[in-house]
Amino acid sequence: MPFNGEKQCVGEEQPSDSDSSRFSESMASLSDYECSRQSFTSDSSSKSSSPASTSPPRVVTFDEVMAATRNLSNLTLAHEIAVNENFQLKQDALPENSLAGRVKHIVHQAFWDVLESELCAEPPEYEHAIKLFEEIREILLSFLTPGGNRLRNQICEVLDTDLIRQQAEHSAVDIQGLANYVISTMGKLCAPVRDDDIRELKATGNVVEVLRQIFHVLDLMKMDMVNFTIRSLRPHLQRQLVDYERTKFQEILEETPICACCEVSTKSLHIPRS
């Protein structure tokens, strides 16, 4: 019988059963492809018309990002302090062969060279040295407890920068004597682990080198004070850790920008209470 109104030619080769089978499979595959494409188009249309995709994107400010970052950092630090008994802070030392390390060494060496040239000049120039003693005084005062009024008054009296300037104007200031007093006071305030450093300071003869090493030991003492505070607060933090982490985690969820599809999940998030 003619197919689609066409005349069948006499002697034309008739399609075999295998050709007919392949043609049927091809048509079936084409039908499956059309159905799949229609299904994908339908799903895409339904997703594009959903309320989540039609909501405008949230504008996040820099302050919000920084607030979320601080909360996450505080949460991580508090957890590490509470669970790690050996946790302590250390000085961030730059690699010796790094560019930053070499620049730092050159700048610091230039500063101390200038100070030495000023103290060795005729007449000596004491202004930079006086500023150093003023900074040393503030650091020493920061180590005192609220009840250390006697030592506080003594430090303020001996390291009175106004008095030191008056003495410098009359060439009566004793830089070595002031440095010795600072070293003696540091010995009263430092941890036992710094006793060797204090003895080395007392054995140093060059006044500029003494001032340089004083600041080095003061930095170590500040780090000791921080680690002592951490050890003191660890038991209290361990008792409050669960409530603290729950509160901080909730703050992070509220301040961190999230997509609309995640917002549904976070709203249903339940943090169990211990």
Image (cartoon, rainbow, N blue to C red):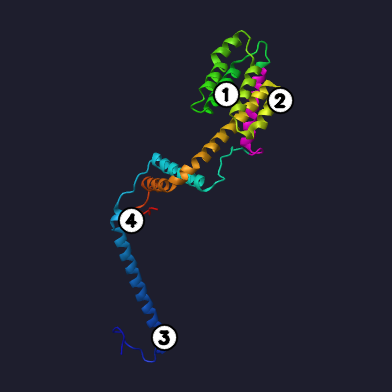
Q: Position of residue 23 (x, y in %)?
A: 39, 82
Mark 2 or mark 1, earlier in chain: 1
Q: Secondary structure at mark 4?
A: loop
Q: Nearer the viewer, residue 1 or 59?
A: 59
> Of the residues shown, which amino acid type is indicated by label 2?
Ala
Label 2 crowding class (10 Å Cα cut-off): few <14, some 14-19, many 20+? few
Residue 73, can we see it?
no
> Of the residues shown, which amino acid type is indicated by label 1?
Ile
> Of the residues shown, which amino acid type is indicated by label 3?
Asp
**Circle on res. 268:** 4
The Cα atoms of the two marked residues, 2 and 1, are separated by 20 Å
Mark 3 or mark 2, earlier in chain: 3
Mark 4 or mark 2, earlier in chain: 2
Q: Position of residue 136 (x, y in %)?
A: 57, 24
What residue is at 67 percent from the left and 20 percent from the top?
116
In the rendered image, which residue does mark 3 sit on? 19
The Cα atoms of the two marked residues, 4 and 1, are separated by 55 Å
Callout in the foreground (4, 1): 1
Q: Position of residue 66 (x, y in %)?
A: 43, 41
Q: Secondary structure at mark 1?
A: helix
